[in-house]
Amino acid sequence: MSLFRVFTLITVAFLAACTKSVYTDYNQHFAYNEIKTFEIAPTPSSSPISLDDNRIKLALVREMTAKGFVETRHSPDVLLRYRIDPRSESVAYGPSFSFGYGFRNFGIGYDTPLRIEEKHYGQLVVEMIDAKTNQVIWKAVSNRKLTDNMTPSNKNTFINEQIANMFLDFPPGSSKNQ
């Protein structure tokens, strides 16, 4: 293997490792150190509670309590609201080339059937809302895709990993993060 190929593989692996699986944004002027209690915002009563809803709620409670916050239903400091935004992408399967070699023969084939397939997935979004002002103060969005063809254990792992990554640098501005 050439030195150029080795360098290219190492560079690609490094860049893939550096890619964050979540994006976070927050209000820089909010006093996050004053947060003591939280509540998971209730879903509208007309919406059925899905299996993924339960997975997300458990992961949120686990991460917040691990950070030292207390869950309460009476006058919480912040509300955690989550959703799975439906997304889709078009995947094109384009032209293909083929080569063949036989006894005294060499052939090249070219095929141009362009097939487009639309793939649907969900994007996990978590928002933290100041209970006093009803303003979003922190938001995290998963850059990975939650799909219906994942097994239950894969969904559970996916949701736990994404929620953990979302809260990795929370609260923003703490001495640990600077």
Image (cartoon, rainbow, N blue to C red):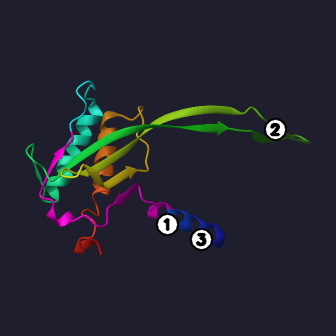
List x then y, in percent, for residue 51.
27, 31
Dot 2 alpha-carbon crowd within 10 angstroms: few under 14, some 14 to 19, many 20 or more: few
Percent coordinates x, y for residue 106 in the rendering: 88, 42
Q: Which residue is mark 2?
A: 110
Q: Which of disc 1 and disc 2 is earlier in sequence?
A: 1
Q: Secondary structure at mark 3?
A: helix
| Relative side of 82 to 75, left or right | right
Q: What x and y, as percent, mark residue 36? A: 12, 58
Q: Residue sitting at 28 percent across and 52 percent down?
A: 135
Residue at image position (78%, 35%) is 112
Q: Which residue is mark 1?
A: 14
- The answer for how far apart the CA atoms under marks 3 and 2 are is 32 Å
* 97 in magenta: no
- Give whichever of 40, 102 is nearer the camera: 40
Q: CA distance from mark 2 to mark 1?
A: 35 Å
Q: Which mark is residue 7?
A: 3
**Is residue 118 found left or right of 95 in the rendered image?**
left
Q: Is residue 18 magenta?
A: yes
Q: Residue furthest right?
A: 104
Q: Earlier in the sequence, mark 3 or mark 2?
A: 3
In primary-sequence order, the first of circles 3 and 1 is 3
Quarter the C terminus occupies: bottom left
Q: Which residues are magenta?
A: 16-41
Query: Badge 1: few (under 14), some or many (20 or more) residues near its Cα, within 10 Å?
Result: few
Label 1: state its secondary structure: helix
Residue at the farthest front position? 133
